Image (cartoon, rainbow, N blue to C red):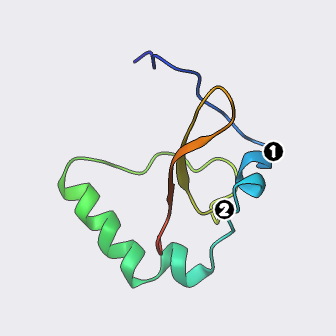
Amino acid sequence: MQAPFPCLADPGREGYRTYGLKRGSAWQVIGPAAIARGLQARRKGHRVEKIEGDAFQMPGTFIIDRDGTVRYARYARNS
């Protein structure tokens, strides 16, 4: 699917650092809450692909205007 806007691929994790996305602990990444969410996703038909990069990097989603203004920011709560 083609996104109608530019998307960032960040293998060097520079954007993660810029927006304050931290690395998770083992408890956050493979603890009971993460396992429960994984099972919920599996029941919906999703599956885990090959992990590439830093498996402990906490996720986030940002929508940034052309002028650099962050219009939306979602940080992982505890996943």
Mark nearer the viewer, 1 or 2: 2
Residue 15 appears left or right of 72:
right
As displayed, is residue 11 above or below residue 58?
A: above
Q: Which residue is mark 1?
A: 12
Residue 3 appears left or right of 50:
left
As displayed, is residue 79 above or below residue 49?
A: below
Q: Residue at x 49, y 65 (%)?
A: 76
Marks 1 and 2 sit apart, C-alpha to C-alpha, by 13 Å
Amino acid on which disc 1 is placed: Gly
Residue 42 appears left or right of 8:
left
- Rendering coords of residue 28 (x, y %): 53, 78
Amino acid on which disc 2 is placed: Leu
User: Alpha-carbon neighbours of circle 1 within 10 Å: few (<14), some, or many (≥20)?
Assistant: few
Name the disc covering residue 21, or none.
Answer: 2
As displayed, is residue 25 above or below residue 76?
A: below
- Rendering coords of residue 68 (x, y %): 69, 35
As displayed, is residue 5 above or below residue 22?
A: above
State the residue in front, 50 or 53.
Answer: 53
Q: Secondary structure at mark 2?
A: loop
Q: Residue at x 81, y 44 (%)?
A: 12
Q: Secondary structure at mark 1?
A: loop
Instruction: Give the total number of marks visible in the rendering.
Output: 2
State the residue in front, 78 or 27.
Answer: 78
First in sequence, mark 1 or 2: give its number. 1
- Rendering coords of residue 67 (x, y %): 68, 29
